Image (cartoon, helix red, strand yellow):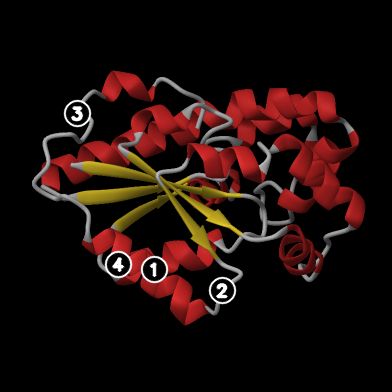
Amino acid sequence: MIIIGLTGSVASGKSTVAGWIAERGIAVHDADSAVHSLLAADGAAVPDIIARFGTSVLADDGGIDRKKLGNHVFEHPQDRKILESILHPMVRQHRDQFLVDHRRLGSKIVVLDVPLLFETGGDALCDYVIVVHAGEDTIRRRALARPGMTENKLAGILKTQMPASEKCQRADFVLDTDLPPDVTQQHLYSWLDDMPLDSDDSNPDMSKGNDDA
């Protein structure tokens, strides 16, 4: 089974690309979605987060208010590592089960959609990595159009991420989302269509997944 990592800077267009991949019938594990489920009411991470950050980050439904938690971590950067120490192992377990399930199903290709793929060492598990890329002006315009985003918050997010230039250097395929969407989509599909599905190069060693993705 070929494992493809999908990553990119904030507002690079990665979620759109993940949707295009799913439309081709390729299973995508979305790390952000896994986090959402962990923080939802009755989510596995809720008790540990309350124990560390208190009830002030609770939402009305009993889950974690992601905006409140995000604001806390932004204002107290030292707490980011604590939050990551809670969430990353749970997301990793969720991801590993996804891979086990798809190996059993005989899937030829799966995609791991991880914002901090390189930063957490998750690329070690992947046979190929797609980096979704856009210029700085595009990133800024897209990001600031999001509800609740500010210049300071965007700067804080980018500070936690590897520079886009370095991500592109480490990629097997760089997908430019500054291009018209239909052109970008066709570039993606052409690359996927050239994937050597009968190759023996895919990584069967689950032990390589001992990262913090």
> Is residue 51 in view?
no
Sequence-wise first label, 4 or 3: 4
Q: Residue at x 83, y 60 (%)?
A: 149
The residue identified by callout 1 is 187
Tell me the CA gap for discs 2 and 3: 35 Å
Q: Secondary structure at mark 2?
A: loop
Q: Earlier in the sequence, mark 3 or mark 1?
A: 1
Alpha carbon distance from label 2 to label 1: 10 Å
Numbered circle sitting on residue 190: 4
Q: CA distance from mark 4 to mark 3?
A: 25 Å
Q: Position of residue 176 (x, y in %)?
A: 54, 63
Q: Which residue position is annotated with label 3?
A: 204
At 75% from the left and 44% from the top, the residue drawn is 158
Instruction: Give the label, 4 or 3, closer to the camera.
Output: 4
Report crowding for label 1: few under 14, some 14 to 19, many 20 or more residues within 10 A (C-alpha).
Answer: some
**Mark 4 and mark 3 residues within 8 Å of each other at the beta carbon:** no
* Helix, strand or loop for disc 3: loop
> Which residue lies under the disc numbered 2?
179
The amino acid marked with disc number 4 is Ser
Q: Position of residue 207 (x, y in %)?
A: 30, 18
Q: Position of residue 179 (x, y in %)?
A: 56, 74
Q: Quadrant of residue 12?
A: bottom right
